[in-house]
């Protein structure tokens, strides 16, 4: 396989990561410090890598990925990065999916502990999801030279895979990272399905987001190796010891020829043996402890490798390329080496445990932060329990798996933990050792990605910072792409020593999701572009499209805004549409208005309690306009309600509030007055509405509904009638949102297009004009009809709107009534709805303009605000632009001149009544 | 994301529900007799305990019914869910 790095080709082998291919090719300098420019190389073999991130150029591409987490494939192309990647400019056309899983036991991590847990749970019949971020299960067993139950470690892993595959309720997810552990055992995982393929199937989603709800969770997340900081510890060639061993034993490539090993626990001795047995010359093992494990020391001695206890690395020397050349020891030696394998110990991967709400505690025995009390139904296994070797990991995994399974109600049979042979025991406790102090503390790197040093921590402590959270923000340690995986505990250790406090007292910074970055594309899944939000269209939508309508979004609805003819702009079209509605006949698709059907003996009682006016007295066949308020007295919604029969009512709501009003009705019906006999259901989609508007609308209606007596006497204002319209059963209401004679024809949505076309055809001789929401707004504004949500904003009462006439004085109570008497609601100087006209008769003010005193000095803030413009239109009917506004004590200020200010431009306006057109309502009968 | 036990539909994801604030805050029987302070308390003041809290939820994407839940505001543990009108059970 050929992979290309910065334009140069390398050969990779099956099973390689990009990093192992680079190691095999002997590439050492791969990046530079983002601020220092110092040469940098790989420090790890797995997810601990904190130096070498690359931009993937082949396939879908990815701006910033660890070189150790990219599986090599033929044709892989990457560019190395110093610090940050670049978002590709091209749209991401890969497919992303979401999926959902419910499981008895979720096991996170398929190292020895996770495999043992999954086996215990799976073989007892529980439904198990085993999730692991690697291409294949095994974790540390893949680089282990131990023998498990008589099998080499890798073969043992394969035998476990076979057993798991035989359990029908077990699912194993490879290449999947659990990124978030949320409430009630809800976890989110990212599955990478195609990133490792040279030629992925087109139909396969690149990544899949798993939403997992687990009965019990077993965390077997392992541990990340921790480094030790010393002067010039950032040179290429300085690498974590277990990672160096993994390159040798898992990937079959040597990260150096001549090695010095430096550690603070028996694990670094074991790594030294691995490196030597892999063919490397291990020239010295330095250990900061006074005593090391005798079995391991003997094994090293047998290989002729000297161990130097109580010895540290004081610095390194580099060749001209900046690559490690020699190691300086505290014994005064200069040891030539091209690999310095360092291991300060293990940081158990507590991130998910911490996200779940569990607390961690410092363990002196493990020299690391371990999970303490879980906050959810969580069990820990392996390194999270302090296990250091394979035998302990397998044993703790099996017991955690069994305990989790029992907690789900399944029976578990006792199994003997596997027998592990072939590895020397760890006998001496680890040391909590984090850094070598030095005068050259600006070359002792704590966070290499941020180029942050011991010097920076010392400066932060000197500045008086004491909390690790503050140190993090001051030094930026732990804020880079690895989020402190390599540097976090190191920084706590440094702070502990500099400030003379204990690790237990300091604790760690807070771990928050996600554990690894999740792309927005994955979170969006297929909900992109047109599918991001549902589009709702009426049954008449296609006709609007054919007739050139310009649409606007109202909530999820697509509504015609206006119907331009030929070259018309919006203002021209709206003038023409308004003129038709005022002087002839016009029609509009009003199907988006919310429709709620109410049934039951007590509908009238419920409406009396929720509307401010009386509804129980409404006669059958009649319609009434009503306004609802919240308990705080503020306007919630308005609309008309028709009484169809004794116990059947039809309520209309504003387009955007349909769902909210239904919920409001349900809330009161269910929680406060469950004794009422009322049922509510949404009928918005079942019914479509054709609004027929204008002084000549009666003639058109009579033409399409010949059986209906349309005379004013037989069909008065605010009445509802049932009749055939164009042969279709229809319900016709005489309501008006324009002040003109008007009808709303309601038909089942199946027939709406036919009825619309019939009305349109019948109106042709009279020049019937389809209009949209813009004209609707102008017509209603000329009548001073407020739109809830545009002219109101949750702080406006009916009294503020000048609609006290609709507030019943007879009813003892309705929702909102008590609040009308609150001191603040009863003030006379509240913001009230007024009309606004420009003094020059020509200038239309912008919606949202602030109203200030005439001639107010705008450049000297604060400028006292008197109110703001809520709606503004050109009015062909009035011959002047006209606006609605909310103005302090507005109803007492008619005639006053103010400035309406938008974007620093003031327009002189006069305050007028909000009902400039036909205030007596003389036009409603045509 | 919480997993909320709807008394009628069983346990479901939080995204199916709407939150309704503190439970057992009854609409006063005769609001006109309530003084301004008491009315303001009814309108604007709610408990904010650290510990067990009875709160209202509505199963918006399911049965659309309201019910009450006793939830711990620190651990988010849910001790009970019960229909409106029933009295609040004490967590064990």
Image (cartoon, coloured by chain):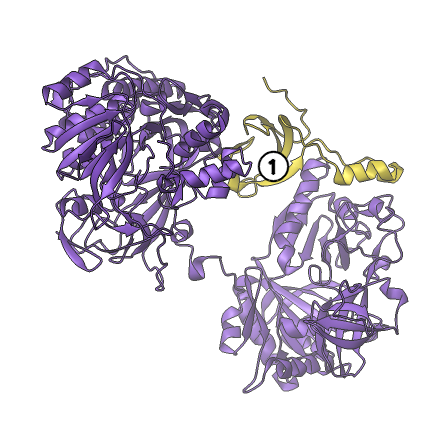
Chain colours: A purple, B yellow
A28 or A100, nearer to the observer: A28
Crowding around mark 1 (Cα neighbors within 10 Å: few <14, some 14 to 19, many 20+) is many
Helix, strand or loop under label 1: strand
Q: Which residue is mark 1?
A: B57
Q: Quadrant of residue A179?
A: top left
Determine the residue located farthest toward the front in the rendered image: A332
- Where residue A744 appears, as percent x and y from the top left, is 67, 67
- Where residue A813 appears, as percent x and y from the top left, is 84, 44
**In percent of the image, x 64 and y 46: which residue is there?**
A663
- What is the chain letter for disc 1? B
B69 or A110, nearer to the observer: A110
Q: Is residue A534 visible?
A: yes
Q: Is residue A162 visible?
A: no
Q: Quadrant of residue A514?
A: top left
Q: Is residue A130 above or below residue A10?
A: above
A726 or A275, nearer to the observer: A275
- Where residue A588 appears, as percent x and y from the top left, is 63, 72
- Where residue A257 appears, as percent x and y from the top left, is 12, 38
Q: Is residue A58 above or below residue A456?
A: below
Drawn side of residue A578 relative to residue B12, left or right: right
Drawn side of residue A49 relative to residue A300, left or right: right
B85 or A905, nearer to the observer: A905
């Amino acid at each position: 396989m050929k992979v290309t790095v910065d334009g140069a080709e390398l050969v990779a082998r099956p099973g390689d990561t990009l990093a192992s291919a680079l190691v095999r090719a002997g590439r050492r300098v791969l990046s530079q410090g983002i601020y220092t420019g110092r040469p940098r190389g790989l420090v790890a073999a797995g997810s601990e890598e904190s130096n070498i991130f690359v931009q993937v150029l082949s396939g879908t591409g990815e701006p910033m990925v660890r070189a150790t987490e990219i599986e090599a494939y033929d044709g892989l192309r990457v560019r190395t990065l110093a610090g940050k990647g670049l978002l590709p400019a091209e749209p991401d056309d890969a497919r992303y999916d979401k999926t959902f899983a419910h499981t008895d036991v979720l096991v996170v991590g398929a190292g020895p502990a996770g495999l043992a847990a999954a086996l215990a749970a799976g073989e007892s019949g529980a439904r198990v999801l085993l999730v692991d971020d690697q291409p294949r299960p095994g974790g540390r067993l893949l680089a282990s030279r131990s023998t498990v139950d008589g099998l080499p470690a890798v073969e043992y892993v394969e035998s476990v895979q076979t057993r798991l595959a035989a359990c029908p309720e077990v699912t194993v997810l490879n290449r999947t990272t659990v990124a978030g552990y949320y409430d009630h055992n809800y976890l989110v995982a990212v599955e990478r399905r195609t990133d490792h393929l040279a030629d992925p199937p087109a139909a396969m989603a690149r990544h899949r987001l798993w939403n997992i709800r687990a009965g019990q969770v077993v965390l077997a997340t392992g541990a990340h190796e921790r480094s030790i900081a010393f002067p010039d510890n950032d040179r290429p060639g300085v690498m974590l010891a277990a990672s160096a061993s993994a390159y040798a034993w898992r990937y079959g490539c040597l990260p150096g020829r001549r090695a010095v090993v430096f550690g603070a626990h028996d694990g670094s001795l074991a790594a030294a043996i691995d490196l030597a047995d892999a063919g490397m010359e291990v020239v010295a093992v330095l250990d900061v402890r006074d005593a090391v494990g005798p079995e391991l020391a003997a094994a090293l001695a047998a290989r002729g490798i000297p161990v130097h206890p109580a010895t540290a690395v004081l610095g390194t020397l580099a060749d001209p390329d900046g690559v490690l050349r020699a190691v300086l020891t505290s014994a005064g030696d200069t040891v030539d080496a091209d690999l310095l394998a360092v291991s300060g110990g293990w940081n158990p991967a507590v991130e998910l445990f911490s996200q779940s709400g569990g607390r961690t505690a410092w363990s002196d025995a493990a020299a690391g932060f371990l999970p303490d009390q879980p906050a959810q139904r969580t069990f820990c296994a392996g390194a999270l329990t302090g296990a250091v070797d394979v035998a302990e990991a397998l044993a703790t995994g099996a017991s955690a798996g069994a305990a989790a399974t029992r907690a789900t109600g399944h029976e578990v049979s006792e199994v003997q933990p596997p027998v592990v042979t072939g590895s020397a025991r760890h006998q001496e406790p680890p040391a909590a050792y984090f850094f070598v102090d030095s005068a050259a503390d600006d070359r002792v790197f704590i966070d290499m990605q941020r180029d942050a040093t011991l010097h920076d921590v010392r400066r932060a402590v000197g500045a008086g910072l004491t909390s690790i959270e503050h140190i993090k923000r001051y030094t930026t340690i732990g804020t880079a792409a690895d989020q402190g995986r390599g540097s976090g505990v190191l920084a706590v250790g440094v702070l502990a020593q500099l400030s003379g406090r204990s690790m237990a007292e300091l604790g760690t910074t807070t771990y928050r999701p996600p554990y690894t970055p999740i792309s927005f594309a994955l979170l969006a899944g297929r909900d992109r572009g047109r599918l991001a939000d549902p589009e709702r269209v009426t049954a008449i939508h296609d006709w609007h499209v054919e007739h050139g309508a310009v649409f606007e979004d109202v909530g999820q609805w697509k509504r015609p805004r206006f119907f331009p003819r030929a070259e018309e702009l919006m203002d021209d079209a709206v003038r023409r549409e308004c003129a038709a509605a005022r002087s002839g006949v016009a029609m509009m698709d009003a199907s988006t208005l919310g429709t709620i059907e109410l049934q039951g003996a007590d509908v009238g009682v419920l409406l009396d309690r929720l509307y401010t006016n009386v509804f129980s007295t409404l006669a059958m066949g009649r319609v009434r306009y009503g306004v609802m308020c919240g308990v705080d007295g503020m306007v919630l919604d308005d609309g008309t309600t028709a009484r169809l029969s004794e116990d059947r009512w039809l309520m209309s709501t504003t387009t955007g509030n349909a769902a909210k009003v239904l919920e409001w009705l349900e809330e009161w019906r269910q929680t406060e007055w469950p004794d009422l006999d009322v049922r509510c259901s949404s009928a918005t989609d079942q019914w479509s509405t054709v609004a027929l508007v204008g002084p000549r609308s009666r003639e058109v209606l009579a033409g399409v509904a010949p059986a209906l007596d349309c005379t004013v006497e037989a069909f008065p204002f605010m009445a509802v009638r049932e009749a055939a319209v164009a042969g279709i059963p229809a319900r016709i209401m005489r309501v008006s949102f324009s002040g003109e004679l008007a009808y709303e024809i309601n038909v089942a949505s199946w027939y709406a297009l036919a009825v619309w076309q019939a009305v349109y055809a019948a109106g042709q001789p009279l020049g019937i004009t389809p209009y949209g929401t813009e004209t609707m707004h102008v017509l209603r504004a000329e009548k001073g009809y407020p739109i809830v949500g545009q002219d109101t904003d949750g702080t406006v009462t009916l009294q503020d709107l000048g609609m006290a006439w609709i507030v019943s004085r007879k009813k003892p109570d309705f929702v909102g009534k008590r609040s009308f008497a609150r001191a603040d609601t009863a003030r006379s100087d509240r913001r009230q709805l007024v009309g606004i006209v420009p003094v020059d008769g020509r200038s239309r003010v912008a919606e949202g303009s602030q109203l200030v005193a005439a001639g107010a000095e705008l450049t000297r803030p604060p400028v006292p605000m008197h109110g703001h413009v809520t709606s503004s239109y050109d009015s062909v009917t009035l011959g002047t632009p006209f606006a609605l506004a909310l103005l302090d004590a507005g109803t007492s200020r008619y005639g006053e001149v103010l400035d309406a200010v938008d974007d620093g431009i003031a327009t002189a306006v006069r305050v007028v009544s909000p009902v400039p057109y036909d205030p007596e309502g003389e036009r409603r009968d045509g | 994301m919480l997993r909320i036990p709807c008394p009628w539909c069983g346990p479901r994801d939080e995204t199916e529900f709407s939150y309704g604030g503190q439970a057992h805050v009854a609409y006063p029987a005769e609001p006109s007799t309530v003084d301004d302070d008491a009315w303001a308390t009814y309108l604007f003041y709610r408990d904010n305990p650290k510990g067990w809290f009875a709160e209202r939820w509505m199963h918006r994407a399911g049965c659309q019914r309201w019910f009450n839940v006793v939830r711990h505001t620190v651990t988010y543990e849910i001790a009970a869910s019960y229909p409106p009108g029933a009295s609040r059970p004490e967590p064990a």
